[in-house]
Image (cartoon, rainbow, N blue to C red):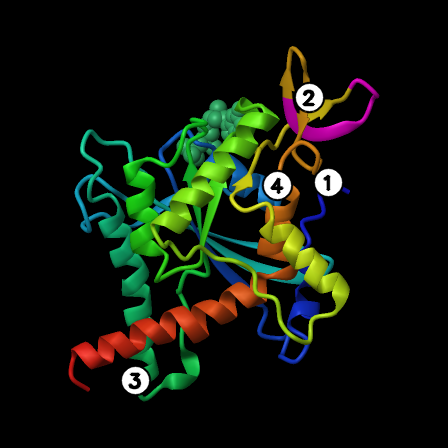
Amino acid sequence: LNAFVGFSNLPNQHHRRSVKKGFHFTIMVVGESGLGKSTLINTLFNTTLYPEKKVPITTDLNKSLDIQEISAEIEESGVKLRLNVIDTPGFGDFINNEDSWKPILRSVEARYDAYLEQEQSQHRAKITDNRIHACLYFIAPTGHSLRQLDIEFMRRLAPRVNLIPVIAKSDTLTDEEVAAFKQRILDDIIFNKIEIYRPPVYEDDDEDTVAETNEITSKIPFAVVGSNKDVTTSDGRTVRGRAYPWGIIEVDNEDHNDFVKLRQMLIRTHMEELKRFTSEVLYETYRTQRLEASGR
Ligand code: GDP
């Protein structure tokens, strides 16, 4: 059961559209190295995307920060998902991280530019969509509050991409520390007027859907634990988790961390919504500003 990722549910999210085209999703991960980004991606999609061929797509944006892309086609219950993961090795790893957000923003916008260019060209039929549908921002589990680096990144990127903050390696904090840390992070987000992604509630949503959406929203910023290792619990179950001398933290246990809710939002219930918001709101805003700036 743990192996079930949930994207085979995509045809349901897609009900009115053609399923034939297949599904694709592009996700960006940002955070200092060692915060568990690759582990979480592997855990989310129950695959070993990393450490396989990381193809550098560009290195000239900034000498100190690479932007890398890995693609994989994964299949579940006959449904195929083409997954692109954009990684940003080097983010926050330098002595001076003041401008760490810049090449990342540039990369997000370059993808919008590429899309815009295709839209304006003659051959609109075969548009390749490389826009980023979600950006997971990994917050170091310090238990204090956001650092200037975090605030600056989120403030700059939130207008351009669905920004999803996660508390990395939350198993290193106690439940009380996580709760207090989340509150301080949310306070900082509000104080700095950062528009992080929040799953919308629609008027025609039924009661269950509204409850589910509220439940997801209540977990933001998601305190996550990643692990692709199976461990055995004291009551003899085999689970994905991390073993400590005092016990086991289970990845897929909602009492232990918010991984399940994050996966639910990203993959099972809101993947289409994230794509729609990217296309209809974030991209459209960028496009309008871009065309205005160029006087068209
Ligand atoms: P990345 O550099 O951000 O991609 O980080 P990695 O995924 O390579 O993880 C770095 C180290 O942290 C590895 O030793 C992982 O096993 C460990 N790690 C990953 N996720 C977690 C987590 O949720 N909790 C803890 N305690 N360690 C983790």
Magenta segment range? 234-242
Left or right, 193 with reference to 250: left
Image spot of residue 115 (x, y percent): 34, 73
Earlier sequence position, callout 4 versus callout 3: 3
Q: CA distance from mark 1 to mark 3?
A: 44 Å
Mark 2 surroundings: few (<14), some (14-19) or many (≥20) residues within 10 A = some
Query: At numbered mark 1, what does the secondary structure look like: helix, strand or loop?
Result: loop
Mark 4 surroundings: few (<14), some (14-19) or many (≥20) residues within 10 A = many
Mark 3 surroundings: few (<14), some (14-19) or many (≥20) residues within 10 A = few
Earlier sequence position, callout 4 versus callout 1: 1
Check whether the beta carbons of the residues at disc 2 and disc 1 lie within 8 A of each other: no
Earlier sequence position, callout 4 versus callout 2: 2
Which quarter of the picture shows residue 116?
bottom left
Left or right, 151 with reference to 281: left
Instruction: From the image, state whether disc 4 or disc 1 is nearer to you.
Output: 4
Which residue is identified by label 3?
120
Looking at this view, name the residue that lies furthest to the top: 245
Q: CA distance from mark 4 to mark 3?
A: 40 Å
Image spot of residue 243 (x, y percent): 64, 19
Q: CA distance from mark 4 to mark 1?
A: 12 Å
- The numbered disc on residue 259 is 4
Which residue is identified by label 2?
248
Earlier sequence position, callout 2 versus callout 3: 3
